Structure formats: C-alpha cells, structure tokens
Amino acid sequence: MSDHSINPDLYPAALDAKLENFKSTLDGLNFPPVQVFESAPSGFRMRAEFRIWHEDGTAYYAMNRAGEKRPYIISEFPIAGELIGQLMAPLLASINASVILSRKLFSLEFLTTLSGEALITLIYHRPVDEEWELAAKALETEHSIMVIGRSRKQKTVLTRDYVTETLSVDEVQYQYQQIESGFTQPNARVNEKMLSWASGCCKAVAEVKSGDLVELYCGNGNFTAVLAQHFRSVLATEISKISVRSAQTNFALNDVDNVTVVRMSSEEFTQALNKERPFRRLKEIDLDSYDFSTIFVDPPRAGLDEGTLKLAQRFDNILYISCNPETLRANLDSLTETHEIVRTAIFDQFPWTHHLESGVLLRRRTV
C-alpha cells in the first residue's frame, strides 16, 4: 500500500467515485437519494493478516500481490486500527528475539477491538509444543495480548479464542463476543453506522406495524442484537455452528430475550416456511405462531438465490444489506416487481478498495 493510496486529501474523491458507481449500478430503478456513511481514511481496520517472510535470519511482515509468488515486506500498515499499529513493531521484535516463537512461523493474524483487546494468532509449519506455550505466555504478558498457536490439525489457546467488542449504536452500548475463526466486520466505526442505519429502518417499519422479524445469515448476531428491540420476536437463521453459539452468547450479553436462532441455510428455511419438508431443528418452534412483517437479509457476495428471493417477496418489508452492488442490482430487479425502494445507503467498510457495503429498505407496493 503506497502513501499515495491513503492520502486523506484524496479520500472524498475516492468515496464520491464509489457513490457514482453505486448509483450507476442501480440505474433504471426508482430509489431515493443515497445516504453516504464514510470511513476514517486511515486507522480503521480492526483485524489484519500478514504473511511472515524470513530473510537472513529475521522475520518480517509481508503480503503477496496478485500473480506474484514472492511477497513484499510490510514496514507500516496505515489502514490498521490504532491497537494493531501500536503492536506491530514491538510484537515482531519480541518474536525475532525468540527462536522458539519465530521458527517456521508462517503467518500472523491480529483481531482487535475498540475496547482495547488484542488476540494474536501465530500460524506455524510445525507443531506447537510445551516449550512454545511457555514462550507464548511470556509474549502475552509482555504485550498485554492473548495468543493462539496454530499448525496443521492443531489449535492451542492460551487464554481464550475470542475478544469482546463494545460498539456504540444510537448512544447505547452493545457487547459482542468475536471468535478468532468467525467473521466480524473489519471496520468497527462503520459497523456502528450500519447498525444505526438498519435500526432506524426497523424503527420506521415498527411504527407502521411491529410484528415479527425473520433474519437470514445472522452470523454472530451483529445486527440481530440491535434490531430485536423493534419487533415482538425474531427468528434468525445461521448455518455455522460457531456463529450460532456466538450469537446466543451475544444475545445474553445484551439482555436480548426475544430471539430464537435456528441452524439452517436460507434454502432450508424457505422449504420449512413453505411446509415442503419437516426439519428436526424446528420441532420446538411453531412457525405459524409468528406474525412476520419484515425480513432482514445480509447474504454473501453471490446474493440471494431464486428461492430466497421469492420468500422475501412474501414480506411487507425487506431490509437488505449487501456486500456486492452487482448481485444486489440483480436481486432488486426481482424484488422491485412487488416492492418499492424507500431507503438506500452506502457504507465504506473498505476504503481504498473497490469493495462497497450498501443497504436497501423495500416496502410492498400498495397498488
């Protein structure tokens, strides 16, 4: 990453270009003015992964460029959050001072929080043993961090394998357990803005009819914990066991007691709601007892499949968070046959890249 690429003076123009590309992607659809939620131009990334490159007996942070086998050495990483920036140099110095910690170290991952916690994963091309554990515990103490050691079919957790983040949304504090191997939004400040925007959408929906919410792809409950306040009850689905457990932990941390999480895919949930087949995972849940007014989806880059699109069109309100404007547009071509777009927003989770998060609220057409 060059100095030019993170020149703060260039950030407004870069964001404007993303906005214009987004509006161009939605060209031909009727949509209201797009709300724009910017990022800090530097110091925004709460997690990072580096290759470790060994040269002349010294380990360096490194990255690979597309198409190049040899990595390039990273001396600074200005998009990293404050805590990562503070830790990078002294942590590497400590690793280089220890043959036990540096030998066959292949990569290093940071997971940090706004609340000041740092979890470091050291990944090796060799087993980690008791001698490594002693050295890694000293590393934890020296830098006030938590350390995990990984190698082939091995994971050694010294303290714990998660951090606890605190996010502020509309002046309310939310706590989140973020697991080392689970997905978390990398830009915490923009995540707060996403949560606030989505909460505002659901508040507006609830003022017309509160009803119940169904959420697909709930992950660790990042959105669910905030949105649940606007509905009588929430039924959320998630396919990952790790994420389901983390979501349940996060609901407990935030005293959210009106959410039920089911481990199933969006396709399976569609089949269940259509009564096409029974699922043992739903045996304790009476789907007919819900009065769903709204569906919330935050799908992967591929967007919604055909069955889930048809499912979404059955709800009065559709709240859609997208990480891919192209598949969002394709999905909107179907969704706008039955619904109208009433709110749109973009969230610059990934400054200095082409990636863009966006949000759309749709309401069923009345005529």
Image (cartoon, grey):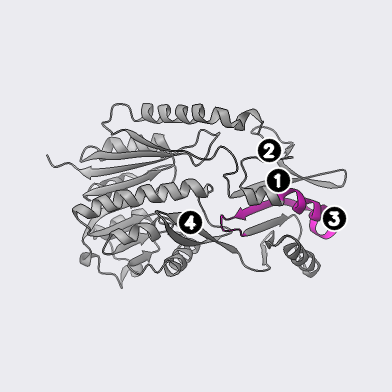
User: In the image shown, does 78 or 56 lie closer to the viewer?
Assistant: 78
For the point 46% across and 55% down, the residue is: 168
Rendering quarter of residue 213:
bottom left
For mark 1, give the secondary structure.
strand
Query: Which region is colored magenta?
Result: 88-117
Q: Which mark is residue 97?
A: 3
Indicate the amino acid at tag 1: Arg
Callouts 4 and 2 close, C-beta under 8 Å:
no
Indicate the amino acid at tag 3: Ala
Spot occupied by residue 268 in the image (x, y as percentages of width and height): 34, 57
For mark 3, give the secondary structure.
loop
Spot occupied by residue 307 in the image (x, y as percentages of width and height): 30, 48
Callouts 2 and 3 close, C-beta under 8 Å:
no
The CA distance from mark 2 to mark 1 is 8 Å
The CA distance from mark 2 to mark 3 is 25 Å
- Screen quadrant of the N terminus: top right
Q: Which mark is residue 51?
A: 1
Upstream in sequence: badge 4 or badge 1: 1
